[in-house]
Image (cartoon, grey):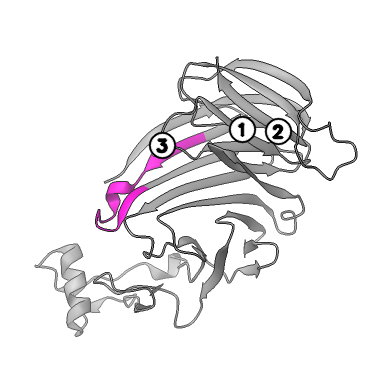
Amino acid sequence: MGSMRVIDYVPDQYHYAMGDASRAYSSRKLRRFTREIVYVPGPDVFFVFDRVVSQNPTFRKAWLLHGVNQPSVDQNARTFRFNDGAGEVTVHSLLPRDADITPRGGPGNEFYTPGDAQGGQWGSGQNWPSEPPQGGPLPDDPELRHMWKTFWGDDFSQILSSNHKNVVPGAWRVEVSPSKPAEEDFFLHVFEIGNQGATGHKRVKLLDGANLSGAAFESGPAVVFSTTDFEITTGEVSLPDLGCDSLLITGLQPDSVFELNFAGLNITQSPSAVQPGIPVSMLRIRSNDKGIVRVDVQRLGNLRLRIARV
């Protein structure tokens, strides 16, 4: 149903994976669904980049993150946070640019689905009851009974007891959905992981350009992904003034030499920025066999990056 297309790992630098789940969905609804993830261990930052292409722009898409406890949502900052015990995760929602961020859960909504079992329209769903921990007979409702038998087989007739006392159900989730219909949508989220009160204090900015999109984490990594159907040979992106200490680019043509040109931004509000278009530095580097380039930098920002295979 799905496949891992790329996996890469460099100790103490990054973990990267790209999966393709396009065939896990009905081909009548979906043409493409790929997910790329990058984890950078030093600052404990996790980047998730999804590309979803539907067969019809009216098919609504929703990115979901499930959690145990009720999340806090800051609509203005486009962030949300889950706390559990001594830990927390703060999520920065960067793409889609224009999106609805909705927390859902609590009593009566623990297992809510937006559509019905027949693939009904958004909003036609319901909250599905959890099975009793002690087990018991199948439910009388013919639809629920059919779902149990579809999953477990026609000879399934008794719900077995479960170890609910040692299971913590995820009773809440956050839904991120594009506000405007489109066939293709990109979802980009940056996770900060840490102890309670330790996350959400650094700036995170969207990186947007030609053939490229990504995110910059203040005093940490800038990560760039491909937005095309092919391996990148050229592209460019603006880098904000966040003092990033490393640059990671994925989706490049593997085992190829690339020239990275850094120059002044065309538009900037920083008085100390390099003049627009003025070259600052140039670096030649070979992508690895996974199509990835990583470079250490010093306070990278307020620059336009142009990438070209040579």
Which of the 4 quarters of the picture holds residue 163? bottom left
Q: Which residues are magenta?
A: 16-32
The kind of residue on which mark 1 rests is Glu
Badges 2 and 1: C-beta atoms under 8 Å apart? Answer: yes
Kindly identify which residue carries mark 2.
304
Residue at the (14%, 73%) spot, across then down: 157
Q: Looking at the image, can residue 147 be seen?
A: yes
- Residue 243, quarter of the rendered image: top right
Spatial CA distance of label 2 from label 3 is: 23 Å
Q: Position of residue 307 (x, y in %)?
A: 60, 25
Label 1 residue SS: strand
Q: Is residue 289 above or below residue 300?
A: above
In the drawing, does residue 297 fall left or right of residue 23? right
Mark 1 nearby-residue class (10 Å; few <14, some 14–19, many ≥20): many
**Of the residues under marks 2 and 3, which one precedes in the sequence?**
3
Instruction: Assess disc 2: are there few (<14), some (14-19) or many (≥20) residues with their C-alpha within 10 Å of its C-alpha.
Output: many
Q: Residue 24: say if magenta.
A: yes
Q: Residue at left 29%, top 58%?
A: 29
For mark 1, what is the residue?
236
